[in-house]
């Protein structure tokens, strides 16, 4: 009886292990071929946030090149405006998910140019940290602890997100990396 | 201990294969990149010789004791090889990637727990001596643990987007595949025992040896071949990437201040 249980559990375990490894390999192959998954999927991920609003929030803090604006040019959006423009917690969640896109883009550069390892890895870690910060802000907002701080934080996050996507786009444009047109549309 | 013609053939093939692999690691300068793996293979050369003479001159019990002692060294070295492979993948800049460290620790803990659970559940071997039972269960535990660790590392590297370097991937694939087959074989041994006089039990051992020889052959070929040459990073692109990284770092500083 014990032997039957053992072989039954072992079979399930081995099957699960096999599925995990095969799935991981397939995912890797798919990522190497199309590092962002399908473009439709990517666009779907980005559509939840109002891109125009993110740009508006970001441009109230930084200019097109990513430089911080002086107080005289500050657009001064109030908290309630930022909250509604960014789409509250859901909006932040989308930005968080979009940071994963940045990791994908960097991974692709590294795949193509292994020599870029040092910089690419640093970027990958930075993107992960930004994800983490957004996650923290999101958690704080969820429990109502970030009520006052949220607008300012959300403004910063939107600005950083905006500048990051501009930079990545510039990198792709400069080196004419595959998928540029779709990326321009998506970001 | 009586050794049949096929036993001697496997012994000789194993010895030659390990020496060849050692030569490949040495001649192709892979030993410097994978020192622990090289030590593991060197230990297998010594193990083959020691076990051969023990089998030839010693009793069955002495052989099992030698096998068990060398098996413990083997498991320790294999775990060190896992660490070596993990550091090649998850320490691309010399430090453990922070997003990988905690997940890797969880994989190790979960692997140990599952391997221990499965070993506890495994059929009680018909060989009732403590030595044989320990041997069978030890082999089973180590096979499950190694397979889980390699499978976990592969899955984690894909999840957090860290690529494997060619040779590290080949070593991991070989060891992972061999450990996977070993689970099946050791599960069979736990049910049938490891008496070499019982044909089916001996056949399982031969199958394990054959699988291992195939893996060694795979390592000899893949470690002899050079990894594909990386595409050179244009200087200008490097500057561009560096500028991007600096900017992201500056943004991060702002975020870090916000968090305080």
Image: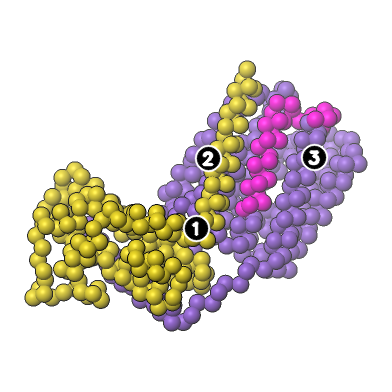
Chain colours: A yellow, B purple
Q: Quadrant of residue B200?
A: top right
Q: Total number of numbered labels?
A: 3
| Residue B37 image point, x, y percent | 65, 56
Q: Which residues are magenta?
A: B172-200
State left or right for residue A134 relative to residue B119.
left
The reply to whether the C-beta atoms of the residues labelled 1 and 3 are less than 8 Å apart is no
Circle 1 crowding by C-alpha within 10 Å: few under 14, some 14–19, many from 20: some
Residue at the spot of label 1: A31
Q: Nearer the viewer, residue A112 or B115?
A: A112
Among the two numbered marks 3 and 2 on one chain, the one whose residue lies closer to the N terminus:
2
Q: CA distance from mark 1 to mark 3?
A: 39 Å
Q: Is residue A119 visible?
A: yes
Provide the chain ID for the residue under circle 3.
B
| Residue B151 image point, x, y percent | 56, 46
As helix, strand or loop, the secondary structure at mark 2 comes to helix
Prevailing secondary structure class for the magenta stretch in the rendered image: helix
Q: Quadrant of residue B168?
A: bottom right
Residue drawn at x 20%, y 53% as measured from the top left: A87
Circle 3 crowding by C-alpha within 10 Å: few under 14, some 14–19, many from 20: some
Residue at the spot of label 2: B111
Circle 2 crowding by C-alpha within 10 Å: few under 14, some 14–19, many from 20: some
Q: Nearer the viewer, residue B94 or B199?
A: B199
């Amino acid at each position: 009886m014990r032997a039957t249980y053992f072989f039954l559990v072992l079979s399930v375990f081995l099957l699960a292990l096999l599925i995990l490894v095969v799935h991981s390999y397939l995912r890797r192959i798919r990522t190497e071929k199309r590092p962002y998954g399908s473009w439709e999927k990517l666009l779907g991920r980005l559509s939840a946030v109002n891109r125009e609003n993110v740009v508006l929030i970001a441009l109230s803090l930084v200019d097109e090149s990513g430089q911080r604006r002086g107080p005289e040019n500050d657009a001064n959006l109030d908290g309630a405006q930022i909250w509604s423009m960014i789409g509250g917690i859901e909006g932040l969640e989308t930005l968080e998910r979009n940071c994963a896109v940045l990791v994908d883009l960097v991974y692709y550069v590294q795949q193509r140019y292994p020599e870029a390892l040092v910089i690419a890895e640093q970027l990958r870690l930075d993107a992960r940290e930004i994800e983490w910060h957004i996650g923290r802000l999101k958690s704080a907002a969820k429990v109502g602890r970030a009520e006052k701080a949220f607008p300012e934080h959300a403004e910063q996050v939107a600005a950083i997100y905006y500048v990051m996507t501009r930079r990545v786009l510039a990198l792709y444009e400069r080196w004419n990396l595959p998928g540029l047109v779709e990326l321009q549309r998506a970001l | 201990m009586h050794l049949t013609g096929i036993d001697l053939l496997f012994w000789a093939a194993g010895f030659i294969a390990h020496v060849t692999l050692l030569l490949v690691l040495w001649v192709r300068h892979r030993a410097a990149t994978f020192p622990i793996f090289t030590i593991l293979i060197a230990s297998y050369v010594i193990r083959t010789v020691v076990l051969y003479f023990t089998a030839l001159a010693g009793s069955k019990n002495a052989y099992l004791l030698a096998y068990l002692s060398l098996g413990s060294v083997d498991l320790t070295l294999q775990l060190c090889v896992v660490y070596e492979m993990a550091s090649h993948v998850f320490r691309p800049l010399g430090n453990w990637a922070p997003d990988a460290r905690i997940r890797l620790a969880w994989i190790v803990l979960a692997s140990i727990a599952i391997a221990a659970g499965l070993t506890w559940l495994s059929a009680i071997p018909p060989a009732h001596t403590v030595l044989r039972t320990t041997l069978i269960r030890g082999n089973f535990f180590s096979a499950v643990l190694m397979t889980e660790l390699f499978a976990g590392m592969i899955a984690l590297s894909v999840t957090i987007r860290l690529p494997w370097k060619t040779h590290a991937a080949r070593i991991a694939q070989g060891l992972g595949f061999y450990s996977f087959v070993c689970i099946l074989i050791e599960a069979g041994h736990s049910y049938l025992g490891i008496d070499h006089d019982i044909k089916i039990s001996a056949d399982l051992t031969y199958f394990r040896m054959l699988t291992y020889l195939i893996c060694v052959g795979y390592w000899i070929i893949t470690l002899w071949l050079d990894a594909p040459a990386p595409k050179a990073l244009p200087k200008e692109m490097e500057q561009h990437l560096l500028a991007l990284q600096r900017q992201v770092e500056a943004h991060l500083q702002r975020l870090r201040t916000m968090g305080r």
